[in-house]
């Protein structure tokens, strides 16, 4: 459709840059939080859909299924049980809000707590969706470096001292402690304890994003920070996107009522999709605890394929720490590789990657890093895609060296 009407003068200042038209996924797609299509529990979801619709489909005629603005009650009841069992969180259905994916949770927490010029604390490498939102809001983000156990508490402590000396009280400390995005680390319990101590000492709440926490290879995880908190100063969010299916767009928030009530006033969408909530509640109660181990087992084999492919194609030119779960591998290439430039060349060759600077508060530190999602491509696509990516790196940046690569294969 073409139009001669000029809308440009009507756009307000501060709009994000326009989106490009969708042209489809790359042949070898290592981007986004997409999951393994073969592991979507399709038959179970079909059965759950039929059961839910037969049982109470006519309630779709009422906004929110007459279960109130916090979401479908059986789904919240399932979450109360799940969060206690898996994360150690003790909550009631009244402490839970169902949202349209954890992205809406981010928006609601930000809208409740932030205004332009505020300061928040983040892990230095973090979720791009969270970082871009804060940039649009005009919020200052202070990044804390990570090690193999997540956010470094010594640097956080020094940062809080410095901010206090300048009269700045951060609005929250955002962390992805269980299968960190993009690094895949898990913050141990003693570090969570120290984070809570600092939060209490400086009167700064913690914003805990736990949306990858179901996908731990060992099946064992520390208690959620929310579960360890004694003063209620933690907002916890999670999602069914990584455990069941991203396109369902169902997430949740656990928060004290004084915060929850403000978020509800801002959630003006007349309720998140009700059919999705009905289907998830019906499917998850009997099947969630057996589905997730099968999913993580399949994801783990794909990670092994990706690491093998990187070692074969790049040799020592690709450095990475094996993640403890999830769907991403955070990779360091030699310093001369600019992954923002690599992204453009790779897309032209049919390979899409996430360049590191988009996932970091320190663009220079992450300029030669990239995030690869291994969940969505097949094993064959992983091997073929990494081979193409290595060839692009060789042409554009001279790495990996051809001779070293031949030696690696010999």
Image (cartoon, rainbow, N blue to C red):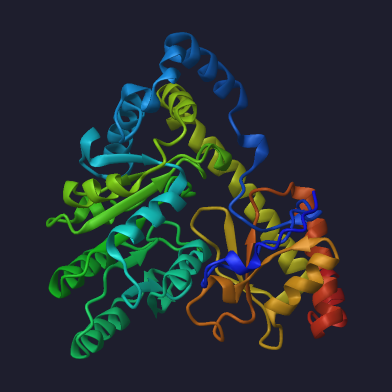
Q: What residue sits 58% from the left and 77% below the top?
A: 357
Task: State left or right for residue 141 relative to residue 165.
Answer: right
Looking at the picture, how far across and down is residue 85, in whole percent? Answer: 29, 37
Looking at the picture, how far across and down is residue 361, in whole percent? Answer: 47, 78
Looking at the picture, how far across and down is residue 236, in whole percent? Answer: 31, 52
Q: What residue sits 24% from the left and 50% below the top?
A: 262
User: Which residue in the rendered view is the most extreme toward the front?
Assistant: 5
Q: What residue sits 46% from the left and 45% below the top?
A: 101
User: Which residue in the rendered view is the most extreme toward the top?
Assistant: 54
**Above or below, 81 relative to 177:** above
Q: What residue sits 46% from the left and 65% below the top?
A: 133
Looking at the picture, how far across and down is residue 111, in whole percent? Answer: 34, 59
**Above or below, 315 relative to 299:** below
Res 93 seen here: yes
Q: How many marks?
A: 0
**Above or below, 265 relative to 193:** above
* Image quarter hosting the C terminus: bottom right
Res 408 seen here: no
Please state which of residues 151 and 317 is positioned toward the viewer in this rendering.
151
Task: State left or right for residue 337 relative to residue 278.
Answer: right
Q: Quadrant of residue 15?
A: bottom right
Q: Quadrant of residue 191?
A: bottom left
Please state which of residues 294 and 74 is positioned toward the viewer in this rendering.
74
């Amino acid at each position: 459709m073409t139009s001669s009407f000029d809308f440009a003068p009507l756009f307000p200042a501060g709009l994000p840059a326009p989106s490009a038209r969708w042209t489809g996924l790359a042949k070898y797609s290592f981007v986004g939080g997409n999951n393994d299509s073969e592991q979507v529990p399709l038959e179970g979801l079909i059965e759950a859909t039929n059961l839910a619709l037969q049982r109470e489909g006519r309630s779709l005629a009422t906004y929110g299924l007459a279960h109130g603005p916090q979401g479908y009650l059986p789904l919240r009841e399932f979450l109360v049980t799940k969060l206690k069992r898996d994360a150690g969180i003790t909550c009631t259905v009244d402490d839970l809000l169902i949202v349209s994916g954890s992205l809406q949770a981010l928006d609601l927490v930000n809208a409740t707590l932030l205004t332009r010029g505020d300061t928040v604390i983040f892990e230095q490498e973090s979720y791009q969706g969270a970082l871009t939102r804060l940039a649009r809001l005009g919020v200052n983000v202070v990044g804390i470096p990570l090690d193999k156990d997540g956010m470094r508490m010594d640097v956080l402590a020094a940062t809080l001292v410095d901010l206090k000396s300048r009269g700045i009280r951060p609005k929250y400390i955002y962390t992805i402690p269980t299968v960190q995005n993009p690094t895949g680390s898990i913050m141990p319990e003693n570090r969570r304890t120290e984070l809570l101590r600092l939060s209490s000492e400086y009167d700064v709440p913690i914003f805990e994003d736990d949306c990858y926490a179901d996908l731990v290879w060992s099946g064992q995880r520390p208690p959620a920070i929310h579960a360890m908190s004694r003063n209620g100063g933690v907002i916890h969010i999670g999602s069914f996107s990584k455990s069941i299916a991203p396109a369902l767009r169902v997430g949740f928030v656990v928060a004290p009522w004084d915060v929850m009530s403000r978020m509800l006033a801002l959630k003006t969408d007349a309720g998140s999709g009700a059919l999705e909530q009905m289907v998830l509640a019906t499917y998850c109660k009997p099947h969630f605890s057996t589905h997730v181990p099968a999913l993580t087992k399949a994801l783990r084999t794909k990670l092994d394929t990706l690491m093998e492919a990187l070692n074969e194609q790049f040799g020592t030119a690709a450095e990475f720490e094996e993640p403890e779960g999830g769907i991403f591998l955070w990779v360091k290439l030699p310093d001369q590789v600019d992954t923002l430039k690599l992204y453009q060349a790779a897309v032209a060759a049919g390979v899409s990657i996430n360049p590191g600077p988009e996932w970091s508060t320190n663009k220079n530190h992450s300029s030669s890093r990239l995030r690869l999602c291994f969940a969505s491509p097949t094993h064959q696509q992983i091997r073929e895609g990494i081979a193409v990516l290595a060839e692009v790196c060789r042409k554009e940046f001279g790495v990996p060296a051809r001779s070293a690569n031949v030696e690696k294969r010999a």
